[in-house]
Image (cartoon, helix red, strand yellow):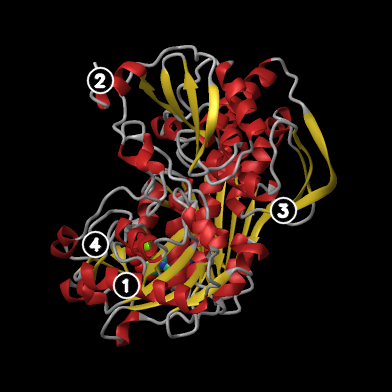
Amino acid sequence: MPIKILDPQVVSRIAAGEVVERPASVVKELVENSLDAGSSQISIETRGGGLGLIRVTDNGVGIPAGEVELAFSRYATSKIRDFEDLESISSLGFRGEALPSIAAVAQVDIVTCAAGESIGSYLTVEGSAAITHKSQGRSQGTTVTVRNLFRKVPARLKFLKSLATENSRIANVVSQYALAFPEVRFTLFAEGRAVLRTPGSGRLIDSVTQVYGLEVAQNMLEVGDEGGKWESGASISSPQVVGMIGLPSVSRSNRAYLSFFVNRRWINSRLLSWAVEEAYHGLLMTGKHPIAIINISLPPGEVDINIHPTKTEVKFQNEHQVFGSVQKTVRRALIEQAPTPKMEEVATAYVSPSASGPLLRAVPEGEDSPVTSLPVASQPLVTSLPVLRVLGQLSRSYIIAEGPEGLYLIDQHAAHERILFEKIKYQRSQSEIEVQGLLEPVMFEVNPRQGEVLKSHCEDLAKFGFSIEPFGNRTYLIRAVPALLHKKDWAGMLRELLDALAGENRGDWAESLAIAMACHGAVRAGQVLNDDEMHELIRQLEQADIPQTCPHGRPTMVHLGSEQLKREFGRS
Ligand code: ADP
Ligand code: MG
């Protein structure tokens, strides 16, 4: 339908608001417009973290010459007309706000040619007024170029993170839509480099390969009855859940690999994350999260997308039903298709003791050790540790030791984390990180988001002993590693480090890196330690500056004083 300005009554019903928060929001809005225009090819180019330039080119239906200027008016949309349309939105956009909001904070130009028109139009807009409007040749489709974003809004600039962070957010937005629309060929160029290319084959697995790499793609299961095919929501009566999920063996340490789409709109949903994690119950180590790409098709009337300005949150009419469908469909795929996990992997899962809760909770369920019923002492922490005598290992997770002042239960993982953390920090402060060259370089693949982090932190990682060099498209070689860490799966560890560094609020990346290295380099719960290893660990812990907590602040030990023991046993 033609572009028209919405009636004020309709406007009052939409959750309008600021949509241009950062460069990635501009990319999201423009890509959504290209998708709504039925494009089969969308290419995105950015410079200066999106602040310098964002250009989105598509081969969609284009905008008729007579409507181009109108497209930049507030509440001008071709996608809905009235209240009823609001109840059954099948497009990604519907508020007519993106183009005018972007033009208000940047210089925008658009070249577009509508289906059936012989010549296209060129329009430049700045602020709220069109500056130039003339005819220009172009094949069918639209190119929108956004320059100098926020230059006139210095306050907004201040809130933005580094160029690398903005690029990584942009890469994430494009990756998500590439997953949601496997039939569309996406290309993303950032700062002149190709960051992502999908083939547009219509097969989700091809998009997964490009976004997450071959290793992940080879460990994915199809979910739902349609064999991984996306369906549109219009014609179905109950929620239909389709997508792909990772085998438990390729789990991740955060939730960044959970992607949800409702009628192919990318959304955030705690409810759906929870449903998927429920389905993996008992299959993943605690602290690990699955990889999943899930589309839920629903009749548009059963989901309200109009509750949040950026449309990234939705409200389901029947939350229970949606939760149940997702949980059951994912669980079924796991049970029917995933190889049975080894008992050991599950039983020895590491449970991180919370700072306030008792450490002893971490004993695996079902192992009815008498120690689990001991009360946990809430002793004030002493700064240095006395000399301890190792008595043995409990549940392959704790070292039991005796000191002059009673019994100590030491969490082997947390304690080793503390030791490594202090060593890494010390060696780093002396600029003498011990490096160990690998006999054979280890090849590893990163996703676009990790790639951006790696590029910006490559030198930082080198200072910590990692020698990494690019090896073709999104593949890198690890040539040397810090000698302190005894680890086999360097690729997995580095990917986790990159994910940790990509997270929010990583102001002090050096500290974060040291913490992440210590965490991933430390012995795990569930690992059998021999006497020598236990002695060595305790000896090193005795020398630590702050032996009582791991670098995350969780306790490394529980202490039962002699006095308390006497009290517990009723002796005076
Ligand atoms: P909305 O997407 O909510 O309708 P926008 O401000 O994003 O609002 O876009 C306004 C209108 O401009 C759209 O309704 C659409 O008709 C037209 N439009 C914008 N981008 C494109 C594009 N890439 N291809 C075709 N039409 C577009
Ligand atoms: Mg739009």
Say if 356 sits above or below 372 in the image. Answer: above
Label 2 near ligand 2 (CB < 8 Å): no
Spatial CA span between label 4 and label 2: 67 Å
Give residue 300's position: percent from left, percent from top. 26, 76
Spatial CA span between label 1 and label 2: 80 Å
Say what amino acid the circle numbered 1 marks. Answer: Lys
Q: List the residue tagged with mark 4.
A: 306
- Judge by depth and name the residue closer to the eye, 415 or 457: 415
Quadrant in which ligand 1 is drawn: bottom left
Label 1 near ligand 1 (CB < 8 Å): yes
Looking at the image, is mark 3 or mark 1 nearer the viewer? 3
Q: List the residue tagged with mark 2.
A: 571
Looking at the image, is mark 4 or mark 1 nearer the viewer? 4
Q: Secondary structure at mark 1?
A: loop
Q: Secondary structure at mark 2?
A: loop
Which label number is shown at residue 79?
1
Give residue 207's position: percent from left, percent from top. 58, 69
- The quadrant of the image that shows the C terminus is top left
